Image (spheres, rainbow, N blue to C red):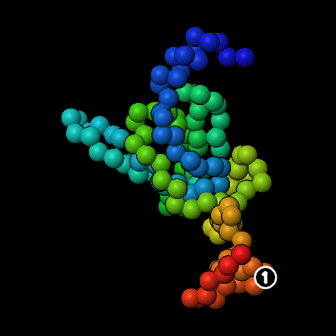
Amino acid sequence: MKNKLIAAVEADNMKADRPKFQVGDTVDVHQRILDGEKERTQVFNGVVIAMRGDGARETFTVRRIVQGEGVERVFPLHSPKIAKVEVKRTGQTRRAKLYYLRDRVGKATRLRERAAKGASGAKAEPGANGTAAKKGETTSA
């Protein structure tokens, strides 16, 4: 059980617009970097292989391949240095941690695309008698 004082302090430091992504998604992490007095944004793209922690201490691990070598970075989710997290592709997984991707090379590291919720494949709404309504035709109940 979390201490009430710790929870109150963490609530002040958490982002209100938390990005929605899951393990297996391919993301672009936009990170603010200070170069001297200038601030620029650097993008790190890869597959989210792990998420851990809760509250203000929540982190996620992103893995990518650079010149044939695997590179992983751990990002604090609620850090002010993280400008935004963009989901480029969703991946279907059956595990919470995708550490098995470390042993894979090339096309074997790809994950299957996760189907969108509510996508039944039907292009037209069914009519009153169960048949699909044709273009320009109205159904009355």
Secondary element at image label 1: loop
Residue 71 point in image, percent of width and height: 54, 50
Q: Amino acid at mark 1?
A: Asn
The one of 90 and 108 positioned closer to us in this rendering? 90
Question: Quick check: 87 left or right of 80?
Answer: right
Q: Which residue is mark 1?
A: 129
Q: Which of the 4 image quarters holds residue 26? A: bottom right
Q: Residue at x 52, y 60 (%)?
A: 88
- Mark 1 Cα shell of 10 Å, populated few (<14), some (14-19), many (≥20): few
The one of 14 and 37 positioned closer to us in this rendering? 14
Q: Residue furthest front?
A: 141
Q: Count the marks: how many?
A: 1
Q: Is residue 21 above or below residue 4?
A: below
Could you tell me if residue 65 is visible in this image? no
Residue 127 point in image, percent of width and height: 72, 80
Q: Is residue 85 above or below residue 1?
A: below
Question: Quick check: 98 left or right of 42?
Answer: right
The N terminus appears in which quarter of the rendering? top right
Q: Residue at x 48, y 35 (%)?
A: 16
Residue 73 point in image, percent of width and height: 53, 43
The one of 129 and 14 positioned closer to us in this rendering? 129
Could you tell me if residue 37 is visible in this image? yes
The C terminus appears in which quarter of the rendering? bottom right
The one of 46 and 114 positioned closer to us in this rendering? 114
Q: Residue at x 57, y 62 (%)?
A: 89
Q: Is residue 102 above or below residue 13?
A: below
Q: Which of the 4 image quarters holds residue 34? A: top left
Question: Quick check: 4 left or right of 132?
Answer: left
Residue 25 point in image, percent of width and height: 60, 55
Question: Quick check: 104 left or right of 21?
Answer: right
Q: Residue at x 65, y 54 (%)?
A: 24
